[in-house]
Amino acid sequence: MFGPILCRCGGILVEIASPAEIVMNAHIPHPLPHAALARLADPRLLRGLGYVNGRWTAAADAADFAVTDPASGALVGRVAALGPAETDAAIVAACAAFPLWRDRLPQDRAAILRRWGALMLDHCEDLALLMVLEQGKPLAEARGEIGYAASFMDWFAGEALRINAESVTSHLPDAEMILRREALGPVGVVTPWNFPSAMITRKVAAALAAGCTTVVHPSAETPLSALALAELAERAGVPAGVFNVVPGDASQIVGQMCADDRLRGMSFTGSTEVGRLIATQCAPGMKRLVMELGGHAPLIVFADADLDRAVEIAMDAKFATSGQDCLAANRIFVERPVLVAFTAKLAARIRALRVGHGLEPGTDIGPLMHDRALAKVAAQVRDAVAKGATLVTGGTVHPDLPLAYMPTLLAHVPADADILTEETFGPVAALMPFDSEAEVIARANGTDYGLVAYVITQNGARQLRLARALEFGMVAVNRMKITGGPIPFGGWKMSGLGREGSRHGLEAFTELKYLCIDTAA
């Protein structure tokens, strides 16, 4: 097997030719490292180089890093660790591509986005396989994420055609007033590991539809999904420089993106702590910020709820992506008259969950992303039990998967337990009783976060009261699934700034221009 042919271009190493066989690393050719990768129908989706200005790019110092399967620890591949020079080259490329991309007809941009989304669906199995291997989620969930990610391409392709739908009636004589939405400029995009495809497309599709160009830094845990999207972007006809992917050390790359005034905005999904740091670093340049940060969702079950339906919603809201989801129901409040029955039903469902490798048929819960996540979840459970919570089921590490935590149910969790004040990124459900509507509203709102809340009740008036009273950007009533291209995804308080998805997500990547034209003869 032979590696790609490299040349130095503008101070960075770029790939100018490749054999049919895939090579994970530009400078150290080696065979496919993970047996499951033999299942790839299109090996060219497995990429080990960054993507800058339409070229597959290695690090100037030949540095790389390992991507491993969190379920087995096996090597999936090695990826180039790009640095300051390559980050600068990506920003230069985005700036150079911006005027031409901005000035293309919106229907042209829309057609490219639709082709990109269609290619994602055509290669769903390969993209899902890569996601399972680098992220650990069950294959069925990975397939679902690819469909979800592709949907943003189609949604924002349509929105590109309606970007200027606002007008103003003149209040001055002999004056015509016009409002225009114009592309913000080149923007930086920083994405997390828990949804490595959808968090890219939800941001990038909106930016590209608006006429912006992008520099994307994916999580170092899950760069392969981002690089596979770059391969498909190239096939879809996304011009060079419009979509750049810069894998590597976040502390170097993201800081440089924040400090560079040529990038006019930053879109970030991740922890509130990192979001604060990015906001601070972007402040001197007054960058536009769109941030989807932490969540600490309450799920409230009233006594009049259909308990079987309530348990189904709680299972979906808590255990999707092994609990590693900002939408996860971290605090489950149950009205006291149905607490015992609800707890028993929920415990039975939790005990039935199958923990395993994401590629094993029937797997419901995969591993956590890394040992830090496992340590935090285990510490939260120990703290809750020490303070008086009842461990109903779970509470241990899986005997055969070192990073998998057994699905866990804690009941009667005390208010001072860490799990009720910190975001929980793992398969642990925490139950508390409540006695009145006013009490549970106060307890649900008693957090710095405000992303999503879940309410389960058959009382229509109560549904409306809770929807108004809960201090969250999104409220789901009697259901769990609420996301998608048409909805404005985002939260209040420490859960973020701005919205993603919907028309609001597109407008985040635009500037509003007002024209006043004298029409007097």
Image (tube, helix red, strand yellow):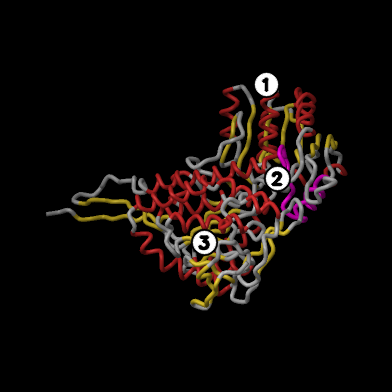
Q: Is residue 372 magenta?
A: yes
Q: Give the range drawn in magenta.
A: 359-381
**Marks 3/2: CA–CA distance:** 31 Å
Which three-letter amino acid code belongs to the residue tagged 2? Gly
Front: mark 1 or 3: 3
3 vs 2, front mark: 2
Upstream in sequence: badge 1 or badge 2: 1
Q: Name the residue under label 2.
A: 358
- The kind of residue tagged 1 is Asp
Per the rendering, the mark at residue 304 is 1
Instruction: Look at the image and tell me whether residue 261 can be seen.
Output: yes
Crowding around mark 3 (Cα neighbors within 10 Å: few <14, some 14 to 19, many 20+) is many
Of the 4 image quadrants, the one containing the N terminus is bottom right
Q: Position of residue 216 (x, y in %)?
A: 54, 60
The residue most toward the front is: 1
Q: Nearer the viewer, residue 382 or 324?
A: 324
Residue that carries the numbered disc 3 in the rendered image: 188
Labelled pair 1, 2 in contact (Cβ < 8 Å): no
Horizontal side of residue 360 vs 268, given as left or right? right
Residue occupying the point 63% across, 52% down: 130
Q: Does the magenta stretch include residue 56?
A: no
Q: Looking at the picture, how far across and down is residue 521, in whole percent?
A: 11, 54
> Residue 332: x, y in percent?
72, 35
The three-letter amino acid code for the residue at tag 3 is Gly
Q: Earlier in the sequence, mark 3 or mark 2?
A: 3
Mark 1, secondary structure of its residue: loop
